[in-house]
Amino acid sequence: MSVVHKRRKTTINTFLQKKAQGEKIAVLTAYDYSMARLLDQTGVDALLVGDSAANVVHGYGSTLPVSMDVMIAHTAAVARGTDKALVIADMPFMSFQPSTETAILNAGRFLKEGGAEAVKIEGGLEMVPTIRRVIECGIPVMGHIGLTPQSIHRFGGPKVQGREERSKHYLLESALALEDAGCFAMVLELMESGISMQITKALKTTATIGIGAGPDCDGQVLVINDILGLREPGFKPRFVRDYADLPPIIIEAASRFVGDVRSGKYPTKDESF
């Protein structure tokens, strides 16, 4: 049973306050109005309009193909369905990497056209100058380090980060630099739990949001389709927990409709004008 929480609107200050008070932060992805409207009633702190829309909505094998225009459309739909949760837009591949000016203009589009209240930008030390300028322009930024899906080809696949000393050093230095740049939060993805705990403790104000990064982060995020069982067959990452199994329910309902239409049971006179 979902619980409608009477609460104030979540802002980036909410993240800062929860970090300071040791309160866990819950984040889920959303890609459309209807799902956002439902999730907003659960008390979730933020809805991330992830570039994972490329995978779970559009059927691509990676996040790389999704465009700015498509992501803005998804973000605008989520924003229209959201009242209390913070809406964070995921900046897609090549929307921020080419130049700082490109990043600022595209981040601004998410706020102006998409109704987002913050953006997420992947990358560590190499992206700090760009992220700093975006924040200086008044646009809140959530960072993202560890496994960064837009760089999946560089990693050679979904490999856990932070197992080697060199990787640990890079991740910690990146996290500290992103905090210094002004990120209100950062995603730690597919990361060895020891280094994610170290990063979480080292950051004074920036909240860490884990996905496959262990239990010691300040919060957690998962893809809504994954927790509802709406995944590709055979796809079950270790960090994903099933909270529902919707495919059989959907198939059963649709099958009953098909059967009723073919047998003439739908529509009845009461369902006609």
Image (cartoon, helix red, strand yellow):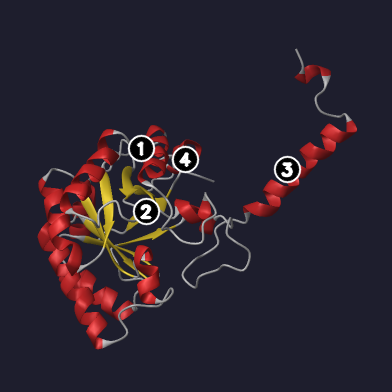
User: Contact (CB < 8 A) between labels 2 and 4?
Assistant: no
Q: Which numbered disc flags the more N-terminal residue, 2 or 3? A: 2
Q: Residue at x 25, y 44 (%)?
A: 106
User: Contact (CB < 8 A) between labels 3 and 1?
Assistant: no
Q: Which residue is nearer to you in this view: 206 or 189? A: 189
Tell me, yes or no, if residue 214 can be seen here.
no
Residue 27 has which mark? 2
- Kindly identify which residue carries mark 1: 6
- Kindly identify which residue carries mark 4: 32
Q: Which numbered disc flags the more N-terminal residue, 3 or 4? A: 4
Dot 2, crowdedness within 10 Å: few (<14), some or many (≥20)? many
Q: Nearer the viewer, mark 3 or mark 4?
A: 4
Distance from disc 2 to disc 4, alpha carbons, whole Å, reads 16 Å
Q: Amino acid at mark 3?
A: Ala
Q: Which type of secondary structure does the marked residue at label 2 adopt? A: strand
Horizontal and vertical percent position of residue 98: 23, 56
Q: Residue at x 42, y 42 (%)?
A: 70
